[in-house]
Amino acid sequence: MANPLFYGNIVPLGTSAHRDLRMRTPARPFGFAAEANLIPALLEEFGAAAPHMPIAFLPNADRPAAVFVTGLKPGRNLFVDADGRWTAGYVPAYVRRYPFIMGDVPAGDPILCIDSGYEGFGTAEGELLLEADGKPGALLGKALALAENYRQSAPRSEAFCAALQKLGLFRTVTLDARPPGGESTVVHGLMVVDEQAFNALDAEALRDLHAQRFLRPIFEHLVSLAAMAQLSNVLTAAPPDGGPSGEAPAGEAAPAKARPRR
């Protein structure tokens, strides 16, 4: 299996192997996300992100997956500028979590893992991840909380997508970004909620969605589609794209003794 998006070499964080590991902010803080035009989205993020970036769904073998649309072609994230700064008003939790990720251990509790190739890791500069007694420092404590929250939140996002798929609420679309005075740029192969199918649901289906607290994120998703204008605005001001081709969010991969969550 391929590693999850952004991650190169995932290893469990160890109190012995990483006792001297420090973390600093790289010169290009979000450079690692500069080529990601689709970024995994959690259900609980929909409301905060909706004004800033479109939320769509990426077809997968089992069920569609919720994603933030951050670019109009693979290999370019319009919300990461030339200096590696994030320019949108919301930073997805998947991005904020990097370079940490929770890993599953057979017959054991999940453990915190890191991408050992992250540019901000080293032993000379930055904040120590571990205290002298091996306990998490302040920075690592926050990273652990975010990674664990992501791990716990992901299944609900998957359940949401599965419920909408079961009800036949998805339709394939072409998202269109049209800069003022410029040519249209489109994103193919994504799905959105079909409003006509949603409006045709019977009372029982609506009650079930309400009971699962899935109605609000449906509306937040639909509202977010207006944020295509944000991509259009960035596209108007952005320099021509010369970057390499990127990849859509990848599946899970298994480092030694730990399988990372998505």
Image (cartoon, rainbow, N blue to C red):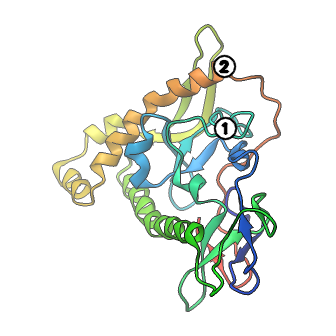
* Residue drawn 65% across the image and 41% down it: 37
Dividing the image into 4 quarters, which one contains the C terminus?
bottom right
Q: Label 1 crowding class (10 Å Cα cut-off): few <14, some 14-19, many 20+?
A: many
Q: Is residue 103 above or below residue 208?
A: below
Residue 32 vs residue 60, the one in the foreground: 32
Of residue 64 and residue 182, the one placed in the foreground of this image is 182
Relative to 223, is 71 on the left or the right? right
Residue labelled with disc 2: 237
Determine whether 92 is above or below 135 in the image.
Answer: above
Q: Quadrant of residue 86?
A: top right
Helix, strand, or loop for circle 1?
A: loop
The residue located at (64%, 35%) in the rendering is 71
Residue type at tag 2: Ala
x then y, percent, for residue 214 = 30, 53
Residue 64, label in figure: none
Q: Is residue 165 visible?
A: no
In this rendered view, identify the residue nearer to me: 114 or 254: 114
Picture layout, residue 170 above or below residue 241: below
Residue at image location 62% in from the left, 18% down from the top: 184
The residue singled out by tag 1 in the image is 80
Q: Amino acid at mark 1?
A: Val
* Labels 2 and 1: the sequence-earlier one: 1
